[in-house]
Amino acid sequence: MQCMVSGMLVWERPEPPNRPVPAPLSRERIVRAAIQLADADGLDAVSLRKVATALDVRPMRLYGYIASKEELLDLMVDAAHAEIRPVGDGWREVLRSLAEATRHAAHEHEWLADLLGGRPQLGPHALASGETVVAALGDVGVDAIMPVVAAVNAYVIGAVRREIAERRAERATGMDEKRWQASLGPYLERTFATGRFPALATVVRDAAHLDADHTFRIGLDFLLDGIEARISR
Amino acid sequence: MQCMVSGMLVWERPEPPNRPVPAPLSRERIVRAAIQLADADGLDAVSLRKVATALDVRPMRLYGYIASKEELLDLMVDAAHAEIRPVGDGWREVLRSLAEATRHAAHEHEWLADLLGGRPQLGPHALASGETVVAALGDVGVDAIMPVVAAVNAYVIGAVRREIAERRAERATGMDEKRWQASLGPYLERTFATGRFPALATVVRDAAHLDADHTFRIGLDFLLDGIEARISR
DNA sequence: CATCGGTCGATACACTGTATCGACAAGTAC
DNA sequence: GTACTTGTCGATACAGTGTATCGACCGATG
């Protein structure tokens, strides 16, 4: 009796579709599932319940692999660092590569912008890319390495955050740049019309507007130029 | 009968302590309460229910003044911008002042580090400090202003985030630097002992460790130097 | 076979942001 | 003055969160 399922005999009844043994759990699988959710619907869509459901598992099961949701987020960030592999010859190229690769990763995983810089990154992949960078900075003095790397990292974190924030705001107002300016424009126009921000109004209205790529690169060049000037002094 | 409170007559019974009319609500009062909560116990301690309780009001009342919690956070950030007043003569001093003032604000309101750069800042106070900065950048060409300001802002956002994140991590391991190194040291020691990160290990062990103030200023100097080189070219 | 010990995860808890809609107040018509 | 209509406001309720607790289960041991 307990074997009956909707009246069909075993012979007619198809096997349970796909996951008879849903593969043993592992941190890697958990993190992959979380990243998939975050990529698709943003960081807010990552809840332990949803991750567990995606893995066909009950939520508390996850606590055998992670101690808290924060740890899961840390693991996600470290997994993202695995995709950040700075390359190049000489300190300047390596730093530029680090910056571009980080930005690229944040474009593929927008949630990264919310997490970067939020807590110290000491996972193996983060350390590995740190190692690559530091190793390539032999030219600059030992004592100068940390401040230089810290400065570039700071710039990248902030620039990426701002860029992604802007991209989201645009998307929220209707997907393309036209609607964005149609929605934000009026507010800014009205605000500027008060005459309280004359300089700002002039710049926003008259200055050339660079796209995100150029803005990022120009700022990075400022920074790298400044570094070059100091270390070769 | 309905007037009796624990048997005391009106004459003996003190007036209800302080808030017979809890003052009419306003965005300002709401934001102030939220900031107080965030200053004391971090951003996670800011919930609409707690804010409402602090104002002696029921939660849904707040929705007459804000449309969502996100809006409240935006208002908090803009309120923080009110404390950021860049001053100085010449573009370099003004930019440095902007950077230091932002960092200072984040030291007084650590939650600011979690919010900065998270969404476009278009509130009146943010625009006001933007106006001050842009006005002081008349020397640099009109088309150069936006990239320059964006670069400095990006650096500050990232640097402050990292600094506050580190500060929190230290605090979490027991308040002072000794315990921090005692807790993180072993992990790093063990990791470095594997020999997988030789360059990193050398730098962490042998290089001079700058304090947060110096690290911030050096990075900022890199950037400002680079900007100066470009705009005077 | 009985009993013990330890692990694992279902249940339960305290809390979140906010949609809904009933109660109530103000205004209007008679 | 009374009845009805209209619109606002906020208490209640809902769907979700992270995770502490502790009962059930299972393997090993006497």
Image: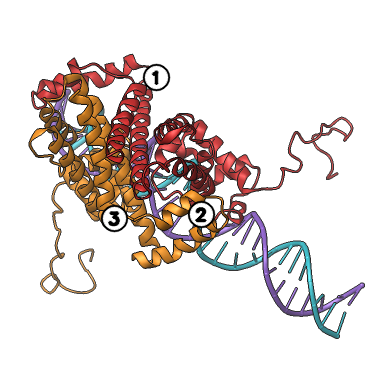
Chain colours: A orange, B red, C cyan, D purple
Q: Nearer the viewer, residue B115 or A206?
A: A206
Give how far apart the Cα atoms at labels 3 and 1 are: 44 Å
- Do the residues marked 3 and 1 share a common chain? no
Residue A57 shows in this picture: no
Name the front one of labels 3 and 1. Answer: 3
Tell me, yes or no, whether the two marked residues, 3 and 2, touch with CB atoms within 8 Å.
Answer: no
Residue at 32 percent across and 51 percent down: it is: A164
Residue A10 drawn at (x, y percent): 13, 69
Residue type, mark 3 in image:
Asp
Q: Looking at the rendering, which quadrant does residue A230 occupy?
A: top left
Residue A42 drawn at (x, y percent): 32, 54
- Mark 1 lies on a secondary structure that is loop
- Mark 2 lies on a secondary structure that is loop
Residue that label 1 marks? B175
Q: Nearer the viewer, residue D26 or B69?
A: B69
Instruction: Bin the neighbour count of mark 3 within 10 Å (Cα to Cα): few under 14, some 14-19, many 20 and up.
Output: few
Q: Chain of mark 1?
A: B
Give how far apart the Cα atoms at labels 2 and 1 are: 35 Å
Q: Chain of mark 3?
A: A
Q: Which is nearer the N-term, disc 2 or disc 1?
A: 2
Residue type, mark 2 in image:
Ser
Q: Chain of mark 2?
A: B
Residue that label 2 marks? B68
Residue A189 shows in this picture: yes
Residue A105 drawn at (x, y percent): 21, 48
Residue that label 3 marks? A211
User: Quarter of the image containing the N terminus of chain A?
Assistant: bottom left
Tell me, yes or no, whether the two marked residues, 2 and 1, touch with CB atoms within 8 Å.
Answer: no
